[in-house]
Amino acid sequence: MQSKPETRYKLAPGSQVREEDFGLLFYTMAGPRLYFLSCGGLLDRYFFNGEITLEKWMRHNRGRDAVSKALMLSLINSLNQLKEKGVIIEC
């Protein structure tokens, strides 16, 4: 099932995230250990506390300007891939 902008995420047990110049670097104890999310400054590690949806995060951190639908879909696709690999979970 595909996630939606209203979905909240948190790190799966055994996963950590670190901010880098390109975006985010995820480390997990299971399987391949490193995953990259090239998101620049759009997301930071606090997004993965599970307290806010992607849609609200983007509105809050990008001001009142609407985030393009293409950008939102790209982020959702990347988050779905991290979810499928067990790095993050929906909450």
Image (spheres, grey):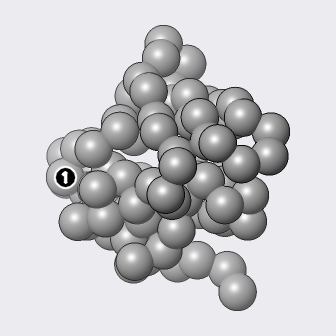
The answer to whether 91 appears left or right of 1 in the picture is left
Number of dots carrying numbers? 1
Q: Which residue is found at the position 35% from the left and 38% from the top?
A: 45
Quadrant placement of the N terminus: bottom right
Above or below 13: residue 3:
below
Q: Is residue 32 above or below residue 1?
A: above
Question: Can you give x and y, in whole percent of width and height, for residue 29 in the image?
Answer: 64, 42
What residue lies at 72% left-to-right and 34% top-to-bottom? 33
Amino acid carrying mark 1 in the image? His
Circle 1: element type: helix
Q: Residue at x 51, y 59 (%)?
A: 12
Left or right position of 22 against 46: right
Q: Position of residue 71 (x, y in %)?
A: 57, 51
Q: Is residue 23 left or right of residue 73?
A: left
- Is residue 64 at all visible to an observer of this figure? yes
Location of mark 1 (residue): 60
Q: Circle 1: is it few (<14), some (14-19), or many (20+) Cα within 10 Å? A: few
Q: Nearer the viewer, residue 2 or 58?
A: 2
Q: Give the x, y percent position of residue 37.
A: 61, 36
The answer to whether residue 81 of the structure is visible from this angle is no
Quarter residue 5 falls in: bottom left
Instruction: Report the front residue among 42 and 63.
Output: 42
Instruction: Tell which residue pokes out farthest to the top in this image.
Output: 21
Residue 49: % across, % down: 29, 56
The residue at 48%/74% (across/down) is 90
